[in-house]
Amino acid sequence: MTSSLISTTLSRRGFIAVGTGGLAALALASCSPTPPRYVTPTGAPVREAELARAGTGRVTSVALRAAETQLDLAGTTAETWSFGPVPASTIRMTAGDTLRATVSNDLPADTSVHWHGLALRNDMDGVPGATQAPIGAGETFTYEFVTAQPGTYWFHPHVGPQLDRGLYGALIIEDPNEPLSYDDEWVVILDDWLDGVTATPDEVLEELKGGMGGMMSGGGMGGNMMMGARSDLLGGDAGDVRYPHFLINGRPPTDPETFASAPGRRVRIRLINAGSDTAFRVALGGHRLTVTHSDGYPVNPVDTDAVLIGMGERYDVLVTLGDGAFPLVAMAEGKDDNALAIVRTGSGEAPTAASAVSALTGAILTAGALAASSEVTLSTRAVDRELSATLSGSMMAYDWAINGRRFDAANPMAGALGVSQGERVRLNITNETQMWHPFHLHGHTYQHSGAGPRKDTSIVLPGKSLSVIFDADNPGLWAAHCHNIYHAESGMMTILGYKTS
Ligand SMILES: [Cu+2]
């Protein structure tokens, strides 16, 4: 069983043996000259940052049991791994409350849970080898942290390509002073699915690591590698992997979920892309969407026909419903297939995935069209530190990297991006590859330069750069990586580390 790149070398025993100062010591031992020391996940600065979060003291307790299961995809049975249903039951709480999630691992492999998008205490971030030891088979681990910021978040493992199984769910942090008014609220999780149908994610990763060059010289078409997925919106190559199914809330278009409501009602839809290699273009037939949040943070509202959402991204939209039955379509960008749900407020034949949705070819919103709302716009301040993350690699060699370095499990802090607590940081993400990448930074919600939106995951198009700004206010060791899980597991990952003074 393939384990995470980090955890393969830092075994549970090894992690415990090097102790809480382990990674810093490791970095010192293996780098030269004079490498920086970093705040450790269990260090005093992490504890102090957690104490500074204004908690209500209320605790939401959940139990997550990761286990082998079967998913029924409209008659096709997929053997997979999940936390019960796919997606997992939504975790819902109020900002300021503490989440206490006990994860029991009944899988035949190590696992972990990462709370995507949250600025939480570093030792609860769920990245084996960086922030914790992996949760071994048969073991349990309790995550406990204050949820400071309201918004639409989600959770998934950070071990190997487990993201591409059924181990995911939504984490909704309600705002105790919610400024929006709406009648209904729906969580819509998009996913590309192959596990237990055409291959396991581990098999796909092995196939992809051979590279397209290897596949060609080997003389056979890899069954799971996809060529010719093209999207102008994504600047060309749309993805690497062929998926037999595209799902909304765990269901294929032939057995879609139906959201029942009534004409004139105003609905908040929380869109989450839990896919591993697929961006989706989302529209609701016959309706315009008003985008209100990007990655959990409010934006100045923008009306659009459709939104483009990369892996790991979230958008909240408001929509006022018409009368009838409407297709909520998530087009798999560049892959000539769709995910589907039905919105029903009246009579009429249920639309199918083939239903024409003109909105899909109308105005399509991307993050560049958004601006953070004033209450979450970063203060005006000089930048103290400028960092670069240059993305390189190719599908041919499958040698994805950041700053010329493929992430090395044996030496996770090599090439780390260093910051000091309290700094205003500019991070310049430059994509030197011929493919788009959804870049994700853990533990922070940066702002796109030029008064753009607050985000934690951003599409960076081929040949383009994206500059983002954040305040280094959450000490620890934070993964920064492509959210195409196959790219991340092939080396497109690094660590943002807070230096000790
Ligand atoms: Cu990538």
Image (cartoon, grey):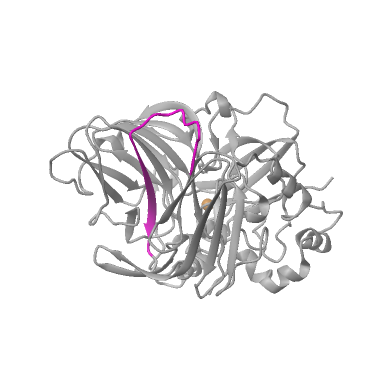
Q: Where in the figure is residue 264, as x and y percent of width and height?
A: 25, 29
Residue 181: give x, y in percent of width and height.
39, 29
The residue that appears at 20% across and 49% down in the rendered structure is 352
In the foreground, 102 or 471: 102
Percent from the top left, x then y, of residue 58?
57, 46
Q: How many marks?
A: 0
Residue 175 falls within the magenta-colored stretch: yes
Q: Is residue 255 left or right of residue 267?
A: left
Q: Nearer the viewer, residue 218 or 124?
A: 124
Point out the residue furthest to the right here: 34
Residue at figure coordinates x 53%, y 28% from the top left = 372
Report the residue that reaches farthest toward the left: 348
Q: Is residue 91 above or below residue 323?
A: below
* Quadrant occupied by the C terminus: top right
Is residue 10 rendered magenta in the image?
Answer: no
User: Quadrant of residue 292 in the image?
Assistant: top left
Horizontally, is 23 left or right of 226 in the view? right
Q: Quadrant of residue 324?
A: top left
What residue is drawn where x is 63% and y is 70%? 8
The magenta-colored residue range is 173-194
Residue drawn at point x = 40 percent, y = 40 percent: 308
Q: Which is nearer the eye, 102 or 210? A: 102
* Residue 126 drawn above or below residue 324: below
The x and y percentages for residue 124 are 63, 55
Does residue 255 appear in this view? yes
Task: Note whether residue 395 is visible.
Answer: no
Residue closest to the eye, 141 or 247: 141
